[in-house]
Amino acid sequence: MSTPQLNRSLVLEAPVKLADGAGGYTRNWEPLGVLWAEVKAGAGRERAETAATLSRVPYRINVRAAPYGAPSRPVAGQRFRDGNRVFAIYAVAETDAQAAYLTCFAQEEVAP
C-alpha cells in the first residue's frame, strides 16, 4: 500500500446535545481539531425522498492514526467539515498493518 497524500485540512467535529429549555435537546457540533487528510470519492447515487431528491456520495478519508480515546482519533458518529462541505463518518478502520493511518468511511449528502 502506498502512503496517503495528506493534502487537505479538515475540521473534525463531534456532536453535542444541548437542552432546548422545553424538555428536549438540540444537537450542535463542537470542533475537536484540524486533521490533514487524503479524500477519495466513490461512486455516487441519487435517491428520491418525500420532499426532494437526495444525492449521496461515499468517501474514503485517510488520516494519521491516533491512540484509542484521543480526541484526534475519529469515530463513527462524528464528522469532518471542509468549509461548507460536511462528511458524516459512519465507520473507521486501520489502513495498514502498522496502524500508522486510519481510513474513515464517510458520506457527503447534498440536497440540490
Image (cartoon, rainbow, N blue to C red):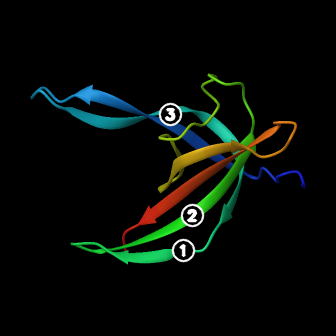
Q: Nearer the viewer, mark 2 or mark 3?
A: 2
Circle 1 residues within 10 Å: few <14, some 14–19, many ≥20 = few
Looking at the picture, how far across and down is residue 34, in whole percent? 63, 37
Circle 2 residues within 10 Å: few <14, some 14–19, many ≥20 = some
Q: Are marks 1 and 2 in contact (CB under 8 Å)?
A: yes
- Name the secondary structure under disc 1: loop
Looking at the picture, how far across and down is residue 87, in whole percent? 52, 53
Residue identified by numbered label 1: 44
How far apart, in angstroms, are the residues tagged by discs 2 and 3? 22 Å
Q: Amino acid at mark 2?
A: Pro
Q: Is residue 45 above or below residue 77?
A: below
Residue identified by numbered label 2: 58
Residue occupying the far right of the picture:
2
Q: Are marks 2 and 3 in contact (CB under 8 Å)?
A: no
Q: Are marks 3 and 1 in contact (CB under 8 Å)?
A: no
Residue identified by numbered label 3: 31
Residue occupying the far top of the picture:
69
Q: Nearer the viewer, mark 3 or mark 1?
A: 1
Q: Quadrant of the C terminus?
A: bottom left
